[in-house]
Amino acid sequence: MILTKHVRVWLALLLAPFAVMAQPQPSTLKGVPFHNITLEVSLKPFRQNDKAYIRETAREMFTQWHSMLRHADTVSVMLWTGDGSEILEYKGDPGQRLEWARYIGNPNTEHAVGSGPKELSIHERAYLYLESPPEFTYDDLKFIVATLKEEGRKVTGKPIRIGETFDPGPEFAKSDFKYKRHREILGGSAMGHNTMVSCYSILKADSEPYAGFPNGIPEGTPFGTFLGRQVRRLTDDMGFDFIWLSNGFGFGVEGWSSTGAIFDGKGFDQEKLAATHSKIADFWKYFRAECPDIQVQTRGTNLSTGADLARDGVDLKSIYKDKNILPPPNSPWAALDGDFGLEMVGYMSRMAELPDERYLFRYYTHDPWWINSPWLDRYGREPHDIYLPLAVSRINAKGEVKLPSHLNFLSIDDSFGNMPTQVPDEVTPHILKARYDAPTAPGPLVWVYPFDEYYDWAFRFKDRLPEIYYGDWLIRQALNNGLPVNTVISTGSFQKVIGQNPARFKESVLLTIVPEAGSALEKALITFVENGGKLMVYGPAGHAGKAFLDLLNLQNVTPLEGEFKISSVYAGDEMKSSYPNKIVHSALFSGGGVATRVQNAKEPFTKILSQMNQGSEKRDVAWVREQKDWNGGKVVYIRGTNSSKFTGGKLLTPDDPSQLFTGPLLLRYALQEFGIDLGIAKENPSIKNPVLTVSRSHNAFIFSGYNPNTTIRNKFRFPQGAPLLNGLDTQLEKGRSVYSLPTAWNRESRVFVEQNEGMVSLKELHSGEMGITKRYRISGLQNATVRIYPHEDISPEQFNAYLNANYPWRQGRIAFKAGDERFGKHFVVEGVTGDLVVAW
């Protein structure tokens, strides 16, 4: 009897974690769950090498993020153990001392840790994060991995996966392997000359024993072979489930720079492309030959698909053939340099095509190495770098909207090993709100990204690298100047979707490059426009076919570059001093010279929007064309000047907007041809423009923005009227809603108003009535036409409209009608004066 009781107790303890799992998931969670949420962390929180202390710390990691982790199927922890040298140095001995990331700053400089004059920066000299950090062995690391799995399972009731990291640079831990014994593997200049491990380097002979090479490293061993075998041994012995390749590793030799093996800032060396491409491909071949089964997660570069290909030979298309790899997420560098346009372009260009449907969003909460906690300082606790990238979605080949399946937090500990609960407490609600309002349909502007075309052009032609490089930089600068691009589909997927569902993008303007002559894409785009589609095309047209040139009414003439005078039909942004009328077009950074003219300027269906003049020479650089037999279809062509250049820094430097016109502004201005007016009022050209996204979620329009200067005013008008942002008031100006908004903002709009002037507000009310889930009041209307976008499943019988009425809503019903299908599902109430209440 006693034995039976003891057995029951033992079984209860053994099955306790599984009992948690077996409980039915309550239906209280909202939004699309993540497949996986990863907590990134260093070993710094484990301040004592004591098993009880390690277990308690591990438990706290999961506890403080529990409200977020409830929204995941699986939870992972990614350990920033060291700098990856713990993989390279591993000998297979559990008692081997572990060199781990116990530093603040760069420990691989000429100055010893904690030494040198005080004025040295932490990039020049490192400190220990504690006066006496604990020592660890590989056996201790194995215990930490096992403990994280055990405690995470107890707290969350979910499967726990643990990942290891490899970084190519000198940032996180001391590395004799990289910087003393094997300097032949170094290249790049991201943190000084020859400081980053090149993935395609070759190792010299080494007699030291390693876990995968007990007799030493043979002369000429590819680094991919060595790393792959060491990763396999370490992950097997320690219990790791995946490996993260950091800071561009595996994606060329320069992860942070606008230059690379092909482009040196002065020109593109086409002859190096094939060899560089082959070297990168060889790394992946050698690496996977040694560890074929482990999942690889990647950081990627700070740039974009086209720019990486043209400057450094990175063939993402080939890398994506590996189906056990996660694609790179959004870069965290916008927190450092404010270049959210580049973050968004990199993110979208890499998700246009994927190995499968999985991709991840990564958010920069803390930095375990460089004494900054972005949520608390760099972002100033403003959530713009949450709402902007989480407004992004991709459309797959079936026409489905796909959201990020994985979410990473870099990191949950700060540079001193602290894990303040303030950060998860404040960040989690914004992540969840963005997920609740996640896109469910294509946005108003859809980027049709030339993923396949860029790789085809790079290797088939000898003169297309500048064009490939230019395209992403143009869109980067357009986004940084207020162009709302947050939906992406590849050209290949677009052709499949439009063939199956021609109306899929009827509410969107498509944005893409000039297609290749005679291509299937050319035919698809022409058919799209002729069937009523809205299209904006950018870039050089030197390789366009006759059919597309005819569609655009375009002819190519002698290309010009240099300084021009620019004119436009648009008044532009409102400022006390206007933008300059001078622009510099560099052929190197803009895909060639300006060679475009309207073929037949007298044709009544073509309207020139912008011209550039150089002496007696004139080039047409933007125009719109529409024909009566296109069923409402319209095409805008913009040649596009990338108003940026290489000045020696990591990224291309934009031209000074107080001295030169910013060419990509024309993309935002030209949206007016489709009825979308996104004006900005500010003091002068030098004030940075806001970044904007407009996504569609359950038939609502979700506006999100980053206003680097809060004195600016946003002015909005769509074909449906002026959008009203929920909870705010606006003073209408010439039919546009006008808002002064904070640094970071995120608002829903389900109501558009046609009214020239007046103060109008949109406020949500409580239901107060059985069968009603939403109720809004629109105030300040003067003979207005109001368009309302309820949830997509609301029928006319479920929709209610009241004029100048109040609870209990027995009086004041007003007639409404279904709206124009061109603008999506909505209802219209006309001639409204006073307050309108709508409910469903």
Image (tube, rainbow, N blue to C red):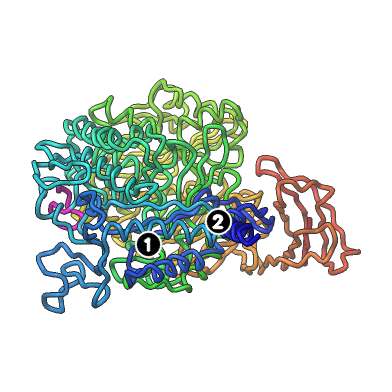
Reply yes or no: does residue 146 show up in magenta: no
Kindly identify which residue carries mark 2. Answer: 14
Q: Is residue 160 left or right of residue 719?
A: left
- Residue 53, compared with residue 299, is above or below; it is below
- Closest to the observer: 405 or 467? 405
**Residue 293 in picture, x, y percent from top left:** 37, 37
The stretch in magenta equals: 186-195
Q: Which mark is residue 652?
A: none
**Residue 98 in picture, x, y percent from top left:** 24, 60
Type of the residue with mark 1: Val
- Closest to the observer: 458 or 779? 458
Residue at image point 80% right, 52% down? 799
Dot 2 surroundings within 10 Å: few (below 14), some, or many (20 or more)? few
Q: Which mark is residue 41?
A: 1
Residue at image point 12% right, 55% down? 179
Type of the residue with mark 2: Leu
